[in-house]
Amino acid sequence: MGRYVYFFAKNKAEGSAKMRDILGGKGANLAEMANLGIPVPPGFTISTEVCVYYTKMRKYPEGLMEEIEENLNRVEKETGKKFGNPENPLLVSVRSGARISMPGMMDTVLNIGLNEITVKGLIKQTENERFAYDAYRRLIQMFGNVVLGIDGRKFEEIIEEKKKEKGVKDDVDLEVKDLEELLEEFKILIKKEKHREFPEDPYEQLNMARDAVFASWNNKRAINYRRIHKISDDWGTAVNVQTMVFGNMGNDSGTGVGFTRNPSTGEKTLYGEYLLNAQGEDVVAGIRTPKPLFELKKEMPEVYEELSEITQRLERHYRDVQDFEFTIEKGKLYFLQTRTGKRTAQAAVKIACDMVKEGLITREEALMRIEPAQLDQLLHRRIDPRARVEVLARGLPASPGAATGIIVFTPDRAVELANDGKKVILVRQETSPEDIHGMAVAQAILTSRGGMTSHAAVVARGMGKCCVAGCEEIKVEEKNKRLIVKGLILREGDFITLDGSTGRVMKGKVPTIEPQLSGSFEELMRWADGIRTMGVRANADTPKDARVARQMGAEGIGLCRTEHMFFGEDRLPFVQKMIMAKNLEERREAVKKLEPMQKEDFKKIFGEMEGFPVIIRLLDPPLHEFLPKYEDLLLEINKLRFEKAKEKEIEEKEKILRRVVDLREMNPMLGHRGCRLGITFPEIYDMQVKAVFEAATELIKEGKKVYPEIMIPLVATKEELSILRERIIKIAEEIMKREKVTFEYKIGTMIELPRAALCADKIAQEADFFSFGTNDLTQTTFGFSRDDAEGKFIPLYTERKILREDPFQVLDQEGVGELVKIGTQRGRRVKKDLEVGICGEHGGEPSSVKFCHRVGMDYVSCSPYRVPIARLAAAQAKLEEKR
């Protein structure tokens, strides 16, 4: 028989922080705190292995019940209380605890062990009748909701009705008689909803609560959270059974949550909130507005001093920021939990750098502490200080950033509108774990209740979303789909703007500006750049993009898509003339008009990237993309006929229609595009190459360093590249001879077809570089059309684990990655100094960047704002390699 239950009490725990896979994060840290001599209420942890077994077999492993009974006896001896004893009852909490923190996603039940008999014993123990009945009321309410599955709002409605009847505002104002009446009403509700009585047997309560917490591993919100945060479904949760300590026994008792440093800014100060005469769920649920932790110093100076000393000790011990929960019972401090604190990217970067300076961690550890994707948060926009704003209200600045969107009042509606491409702001009285799917798609979250450690605040910070919490000036009417602030009524669909850094709620759309990066961020990036060996470039099509890329630390451009330049209002007519040309002469004439425009484009981009390589991809999409759509032309021609327009006008449109029909393809993605276009219409590529080299020549004459690289798209054979390479070399030599200038350049190809990867040894004979276009390589490897697949079946495939990830967001290392590896190896077998990079958006996705490092690429290229992510991921890849 295996071991499934682990005991913990002050100075005598059977587990440790190293056992989080078995005990879950909460159980492991309770054991660690107990071993450190920190006051922890005694209890025991049922391991994650039981959850995994229970989920698969729908029963518990043999011997588990005996272990639970044995450890419950140990808790009784430790506390001097007896479970179910009418005179001196032991009460316990039953809480979840996965190996990675999933705040609020699974279930908790408090005050297990209370019934009509033991409540009298609790009154005798505490000499506080109101407290005992309030604890009993909380048990029935939580048990009814969590274990029996009754909608929690039904219990809240009964409480609200009772407060209204008694003319009081807060729960604490209800008297003993009121609580006794509530208990009866709660029990009637349970009987009505579930056709059974509330279980009076403490052991039945414990067993049912344990089952409910294990089952909550697979509730909808937990599954959604794991999907969003890429947590394995196979890990399971532990269950922690712990002696209850009470913060609601009067004004010498209280409860709170906190962080050893500010989780929003990273400032080194004790940060959190507390409530006197309250239980833990009162702080996070937002039912009462909590006080900032520093005020505890005035109300309970000795407790605050002990709290400060222990939390500093915990931070030094774990060498990281701690998120802790505590309860004060009759002036005595207890710790209920500690864990690594979730924090904003801004705070994460500052804390990592500060801890290096404080000697707590090394630079390498600091770099490994930051999730690369988290840096995205640092790049959030902020409110333009020059903008005129109408501030409607102010709440708590729960998570930084600025966002504009239309108001929605339910998570389901948020998902519905977000799927339609709308930017939404989720507005709630307070959020709960059931809202996770709506929070995930919202631009920002606004709540009228709750504090800086409320569910909305913690989850928003974890997701990197802007959040304003506890905005009590607004009245949220979720049923009526409206919010009221200072007499103004805003409804679903109205625009508001939130500033999560200041707590402001503003009317309408407010302009925002790009973030400015400095200080700790720049220091961290310098450390990353000093360690990584793989370059990071950017995908940039305009001078502005190139400028931003340099600001973000890009070391060149890995992909400049020239087709985007052709859609400008001043260029499109000439492009269309080129396509409509009846003969070569007409086509050349149209192309000639485009050449100076292209030259200016390249000159500006080279100027921004002076001293760094710039890869220009020649025209890639099929020509019909530059003409009006077939369906639109038909409608236009029919409309002209109906309106009896001039025949010449109709003939012109029909001429375009005929050309569109000529160019139409059954599958344009695999049709007449890329290098095929350059071979059949060489004058287009010739023009672009001339523009590139003439732009480079002019800048070189100005004394600037320019390194152009010409990329041929969609090459499948060595012969295709050979034909085009010959033309490019000829043009380069003609320009150098004519201008009496020498410049360095490279000619390479985008590897985006499986055949190209497999025949890379042949193609490399004609290439100076390979750039893997993994967007198209993914399409051609899977046989997916990206636009169709992502909208129609990939979400279902990932949900049902047919695919682990969306392969267009995270590189499919098993299939597409294998082609990348083969292409790289075969190319370098022929040409050792072959430059190899990646230019799909995978170049900014951390796990894909690390794969590129392992394959031996020279660089990755991604959108400008993902450059810092790639720089950090590349440094982490190098550190992981050393390990």
Image (cartoon, helix red, strand yellow):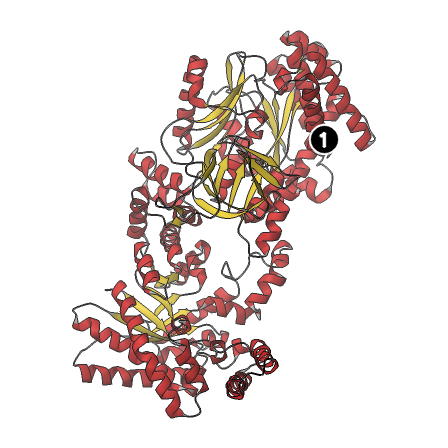
Asked whether residue 200 is in view, the answer is no
- Residue 608 shown left or right of residue 266 in the figure: left
Which residue is drawn at the image coordinates 81% and 26% (left, top)?
197
Q: Is residue 320 left or right of residue 1?
A: left
For image coordinates 60% across by 50% down, the residue present is 415
Residue 590 versus residue 806 in the image, above or below: below
Instruction: Please state the horizontal and vertical placement of residue 402, each as a whole percent of the image.
Output: 44, 44
Label 1 is placed on what type of residue? Lys
Direction from residue 38 to residue 282 in the image, left or right = right
Viewer-side residue, 478 vs 198:
478
Q: In x, y percent, where is residue 557?
A: 33, 65
Q: Secondary structure at mark 1?
A: helix
**The quarter of the displayed image where residue 551 is located:** bottom left
Where does label 1 land, which residue? 154
Q: Position of residue 721 (x, y in %)?
A: 39, 82
- Residue 684 falls in image quadrant: bottom left
Front-most of 329 and 582? Answer: 582
Q: Where, quadrant-wise, is the N terminus in this rendering?
A: top right
